[in-house]
Image (cartoon, rainbow, N blue to C red):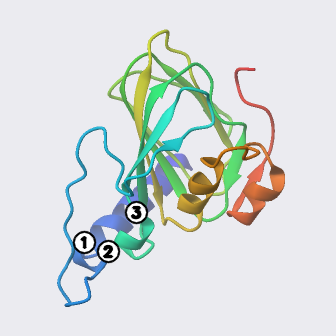
Amino acid sequence: MLSLNRRSLLRAVTALPFASWLATAEDGTQAVQVVQAGADRTGQPHKAVRAGSHLDFKVLTRETNGGMFVMENMNMSRGGPPRHVHFEQEEWFYLIEGGDVVMEIGEQKLRLKPGDSVLAPRNVPHVWAYIGEQPGRMIIAFSPAAKIESYFEETSKPGAKLNDPQRYEAHGMKLLGPPLLG
């Protein structure tokens, strides 16, 4: 089932003309922006669920007309988000460097090493945890973007409750259980 969903997503992505995803500038031209290494597309810092971890937004929802949202999770420390499910999008993980990431997608237990990637299909519960000793770095993409960018904007604000079931539901997800590491 996972490979069918992955294939379906990849087939859909390659069937779309990429230019239709790009946001159009006021003069009708396609806006092209380079996001430098270590930079956030918005120019604002974002934090991840785990203390010390940092998110850089690389491709914004509005730039793809809702087609996708991409972020880089840097300085990852041990741990990860609670078990949850996305009702509106697939989530793709690509571990760039650092230690391993353990994951559960549906009933499958996986271990990603740097250079590995995996797709978590929509409507399939999943959870992951970074288990490396040194800081790690991972790219995470969501397609379509739905409300996920605003979720990360909100949880980056000071005092935000990170594991709030209502926040998950407001952004097209459901909180299902605890993180893999406490």
Where does residue 159 sit, x and y in percent of width and height?
Answer: 73, 44
Secondary structure under the numbered disc 2 in the rendered image: loop
Mark 1 Cα within 10 Å, few/some/many (few <14, many 20+)?
few
Quadrant position of residue 12: bottom left
Which residue is depicted at the point 57% across and 59% down?
Answer: 148
Left/right placement of residue 130 relative to residue 166 reads left
Can you identify the residue that label 3 sits on?
Answer: 60
Can you identify the residue that label 1 sits on?
Answer: 18
Kind of residue at disc 1? Phe
Kind of residue at disc 2? Trp
Label 3 – label 2 distance at C-alpha: 11 Å
Secondary structure under the numbered disc 1 in the rendered image: helix
Secondary structure under the numbered disc 3 in the rendered image: loop
Quadrant position of residue 174: bottom right
Which label's residue is closer to the chain start, 3 or 2? 2
The circle drawn on residue 181 is: none
Residue lying furthest top in this view? 133
User: Front-most of 103 and 23?
Assistant: 23
Which label's residue is closer to the chain start, 1 or 3? 1
Left/right placement of residue 116 relative to residue 5 reads left
Mark 2 Cα within 10 Å, few/some/many (few <14, many 20+)?
some
Where does residue 135 sit, x and y in percent of width and height?
Answer: 44, 18
Foreground tag (1 vs 3) = 3
Quadrant of the rendering where the C terminus is positioned: top right
> How many marks do you count on the picture?
3
Can you identify the residue that label 2 sits on?
Answer: 21
Where does residue 119 sit, x and y in percent of width and height?
Answer: 48, 45
Label 1 – label 2 distance at C-alpha: 5 Å
Q: Are marks 1 and 2 in contact (CB under 8 Å)?
A: yes
Where does residue 140 sit, x and y in percent of width and height?
Answer: 45, 45
